[in-house]
């Protein structure tokens, strides 16, 4: 594909406007992605707790389901409204992208709309229906929220997979012709990205929730409430953390074939080489085409990307300089994601061993301390991974088809909405943090939680 | 019946549903702001109780409309985005603050912080419909211009004019009217009287703002005005809308709240449909039409199939939601005292 950057442009926007548009969209997504991930995973935790209550009759699990449901309500509402911002900003900031890509990524987005409907409807029934609906319907409503949350993430990731590897159309004079909506909906590489994203939602949310309960379990080691909570959150998050490296391996092999420049930037590989080493850490410098302070593992990258120590790995030199992503950003984000992911997998593995030995939830003080420290790391890894895929696709918004600079809105003065939304996100983040802290630290019905700690 | 026409109908249907459902939620916020009298706290509690379980689901109709627009009519989505940039950004801020503050208030009950969340919730509930109305008015006014390549030819403030503000006020009045009509059904005793009076007052405001918007449309939105006045169907539409409005008034006056609710909803639906019909075939008057903005027909057909399949899951779930929270026979017009339900 030749790309459509050559077609007459409607007047280039100043660089500041492009930057402001990217900052605004990036900030909006970085904010939304946290709530979206929690919205996928929290309902699963909540419904697992309720299911255990219905099976065992142990009140701690009911209390847990109710408390998690409140947290889910707050986080889901912020996710819903921040997601609305994204759906409008797609057009407000990138109208030329949407004019081209709307019909191609519209199918997953419209199906996601119905999944979002199901999430909102059944969450309403779940949150407000404890006394209004029967036990089976209530549990089923919770399961429907958990399922439709995952389905939402599935569809949205399909749209991103298309931007990374567009398919299902022929480019004729800058327009998409011969559109095949279903081919566009499932572009090459979609399974890897979808699996990776879904696992990251459970991983990040699981470790974040586990950290909160591990913190309180260190304070009151006998609390059955926090023990039950830790069991579910760490169980789901830990399982995801153990599976994630496998999914990461699949993804790396996928992008080695379909987005080699992204892999080259992520691995700080400037020269096309056979038997390429794996570059860990270091600061890639695009001008001198070198990476300083890096640790190199011989044959590592060829092994990783192609499962063959002598495989040919494309470096950035195989691509014109004007279509390079920024290797410094992509490499650092990639190393952060992989490093944190492996660390969390290690903590999960350790937890599994301790749980097997203790025949129950691991509650050793030192292990709990590690879980507390690991709390935010899953979300750091998730954000870093998202940055890898977005920065790694630059300068394109649609890989090899449309440059980000050509997609930006002709409307100016974008720094103002950026500043405004930044303030709103900071305020919302602070409010959410405060409310959740209050829910956890000073529950209104504190008696129930304390009573559960027999 | 081309795919483009059907998708246009789906778009309008989603907007009608958004007005009837989410519109009433915004209206609830307006009544939260205007809560007054000896039962001020009870009024606010009823609003919170009524919209709590359903506002997020109601909100999704807007997302559906946006998605249908950019999938089916991508050029129109781009044109709307560049010409309505400022009102849409402000609308988004209103939507974000309304939803977040409402939830924060629900879960941070009882103290000063919760009261400030309440203030944000209720003021954002006025700002959002106002800007929604401004945006709709601007789309119809002919003031938004784009060139064939999709670049804006109208200024960033083009959306703001006396006519579009009148439509914004009309939206606020309509949503307040809807909310009060719905709440009259859901309230009991003296609270019911409170909302019945409010519904009647809001009905008068609807009439006044609609008359103002129509008067201004004559010079400021001539094509819309012609659509609203120049056809045989427009006369029939006005007649139906007038019948619905008068019946809503009559039913409220005669203390038949369920009938009043139905007529109020019919009136609002007819007004939105009337806007759509008067503007047809334009999505953005006068530069963007349904056919001119349409995407590839293959996608339109696939989207219609997806919408049909989605509807099969959506409508039963929606019915269940309203059945659970709005009592048995959630949409019936027969008066029967609904069983008192314990608060969640």
Image (cartoon, coloured by chain):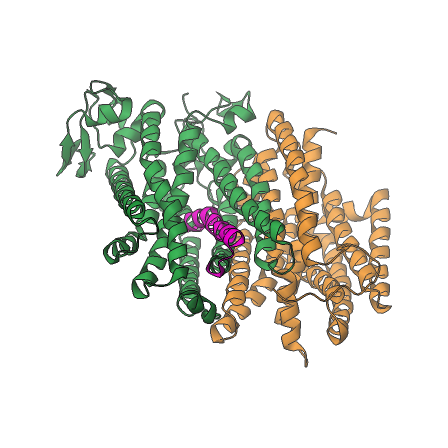
Chain colours: A green, B orange
In this rendering, would B201 be left or right of A318? right
Q: Which residues are magenta?
A: A31-60
Residue A29, percent from left and from top: 42, 47
- Front residue of this view, candidates A345 and A249: A345
Q: How many marks?
A: 0
Residue A56 counted in the magenta span: yes
> Can you tell which quarter of the image residue A304 is in?
top left
Residue A23 visible, this angle: no
Q: From what the image shows, is residue A294 above or below residue A56?
A: above
Quarter of the image that includes the C terminus of chain A: bottom left
Quarter of the image that includes the N terminus of chain A: top left
In this rendering, would A71 be left or right of A239? right
Residue B121 visible, this angle: yes
Q: From what the image shows, is residue B50 above or below residue A395?
A: below
Who's the residue at 50% across and 64% down the image? B104
In this rendering, would A225 be left or right of B263? left
- Front residue of this view, candidates A233 and A154: A233
Residue A293, percent from left and from top: 12, 39
Residue A21 counted in the magenta span: no
Residue A415, percent from left and from top: 40, 52
Q: From what the image shows, is residue A430 above or below residue A302?
A: below
In this rendering, would B63 be left or right of B236? left
Who's the residue at 68% across and 50% down the image? B320
The majority secondary structure of the magenta stretch comes to helix
Q: Which residue is the extreme one toward the bottom?
A: B38
Residue B43, percent from left and from top: 66, 72
Q: Which residue is the extreme one toward the left?
A: A293
């Amino acid at each position: 594909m030749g790309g459509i950057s050559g077609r007459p442009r409607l007047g280039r926007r100043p660089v500041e406007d492009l930057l402001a548009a990217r900052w605004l969209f990036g900030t909006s997504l970085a904010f939304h992605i946290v709530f979206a991930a929690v919205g996928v995973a929290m309902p699963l935790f909540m419904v697992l707790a309720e299911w255990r209550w219905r099976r065992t009759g142990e009140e701690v699990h009911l209390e847990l389901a109710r408390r998690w449901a409140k947290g889910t309500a707050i986080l889901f509402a912020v996710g819903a409204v921040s997601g609305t911002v994204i759906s409008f900003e797609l057009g407000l900031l990138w109208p030329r992208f949407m004019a081209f890509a709307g019909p191609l990524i519209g199918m997953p987005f419209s199906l996601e709309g119905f999944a979002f409907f199901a999430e909102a409807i059944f969450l309403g029934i779940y949150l407000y229906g404890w006394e209004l609906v029967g036990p089976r319907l209530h549990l089923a409503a919770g399961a429907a929220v958990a399922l439709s949350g995952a389905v939402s993430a599935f569809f949205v990731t399909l749209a991103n997979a298309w931007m990374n590897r567009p398919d299902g159309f022929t480019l004729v004079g800058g327009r998409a012709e011969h559109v095949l909506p279903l081919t566009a909906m499932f572009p090459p590489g979609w399974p890897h990205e979808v699996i990776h994203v879904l696992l990251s939602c459970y991983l990040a949310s699981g470790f974040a929730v586990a950290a909160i309960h591990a913190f309180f379990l260190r304070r009151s080691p006998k609390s059955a409430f926090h023990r039950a909570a830790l069991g579910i959150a760490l169980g789901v998050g830990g399982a995801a953390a153990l599976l994630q490296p496998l999914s990461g391996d699949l993804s790396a092999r996928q992008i080695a074939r379909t987005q080699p420049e992204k892999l080259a930037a992520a691995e700080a590989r400037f020269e096309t080489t056979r038997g390429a080493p794996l570059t860990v850490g270091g600061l890639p410098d695009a001008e001198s085409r070198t990476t300083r302070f890096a640790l190199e593992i011989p044959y590592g990258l060829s092994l990783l990307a192609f499962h063959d120590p002598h495989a040919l790995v494309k470096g950035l030199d195989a691509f014109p300089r004007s279509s390079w992503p920024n290797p410094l950003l992509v490499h650092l984000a990639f190393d952060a994601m992989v490093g944190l992911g492996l660390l969390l997998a290690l903590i999960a593995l350790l937890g599994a061993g301790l749980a097997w030995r203790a025949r129950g939830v691991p509650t050793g003080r030192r292990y709990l301390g590690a879980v507390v420290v690991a709390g935010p790391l899953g979300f750091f890894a998730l954000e870093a991974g998202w940055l890898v895929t977005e920065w790694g696709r630059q300068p394109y918004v649609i890989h090899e088809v449309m440059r980000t600079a050509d997609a930006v809105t002709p409307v100016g003065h974008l720094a103002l909405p950026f500043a405004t939304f930044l303030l709103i996100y900071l305020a919302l983040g602070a409010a959410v943090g405060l409310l959740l802290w209050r829910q956890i630290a000073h529950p209104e019905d504190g008696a129930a939680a304390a009573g559960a700690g027999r | 019946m081309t795919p483009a026409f059907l998708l246009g109908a789906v778009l309008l249907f989603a907007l009608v549903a958004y007005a009837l459902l989410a519109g009433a939620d915004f209206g609830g916020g307006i009544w939260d702001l205007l809560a007054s009298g000896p039962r001020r706290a009870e009024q606010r509690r009823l609003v919170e109780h009524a919209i709590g379980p359903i506002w997020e689901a109601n909100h999704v109709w807007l997302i559906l409309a946006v998605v249908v627009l950019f999938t089916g009519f991508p050029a129109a989505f781009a044109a709307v985005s560049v010409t309505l940039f400022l009102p849409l950004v402000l609308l988004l801020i209103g939507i974000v603050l309304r939803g977040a503050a409402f939830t924060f208030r629900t879960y941070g009950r009882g103290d000063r912080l919760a009261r400030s969340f309440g203030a944000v919730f209720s003021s954002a509930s006025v700002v959002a419909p106002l800007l929604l109305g401004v945006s709709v008015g601007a789309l119809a006014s002919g003031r938004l211009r784009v060139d064939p390549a999709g670049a804006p030819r109208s200024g960033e403030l083009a959306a703001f004019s006396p006519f579009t503000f009148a439509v914004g006020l009309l939206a606020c009045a309509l949503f307040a009217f809807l909310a009060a009509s719905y709440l009259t059904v859901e309230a009991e005793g003296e609270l019911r009287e409170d909302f019945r009076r409010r519904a009647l007052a809001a009905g008068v405001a609807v009439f006044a703002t609609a008359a103002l918007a129509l008067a201004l449309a004559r010079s400021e939105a001539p094509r819309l005005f012609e659509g609203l006045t120049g056809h045989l169907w427009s006369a029939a539409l006005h007649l139906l809308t007038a019948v619905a409005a008068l019946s809503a008034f009559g039913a409220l006056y005669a203390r038949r709240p369920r009938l009043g609710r139905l007529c109020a909803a019919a009136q609002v639906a007819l007004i939105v449909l009337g806007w759509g019909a008067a503007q047809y075939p334009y999505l953005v008057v006068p530069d963007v039409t349904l056919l001119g903005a349409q995407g590839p027909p293959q996608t339109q057909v696939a989207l219609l199939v997806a919408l049909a399949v989605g509807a099969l899951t959506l409508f039963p779930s929606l019915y269940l939601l309203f059945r659970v929270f709005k009592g048995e026979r959630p949409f019936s017009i027969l008066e029967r005292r609904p069983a008192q339900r314990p608060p969640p």
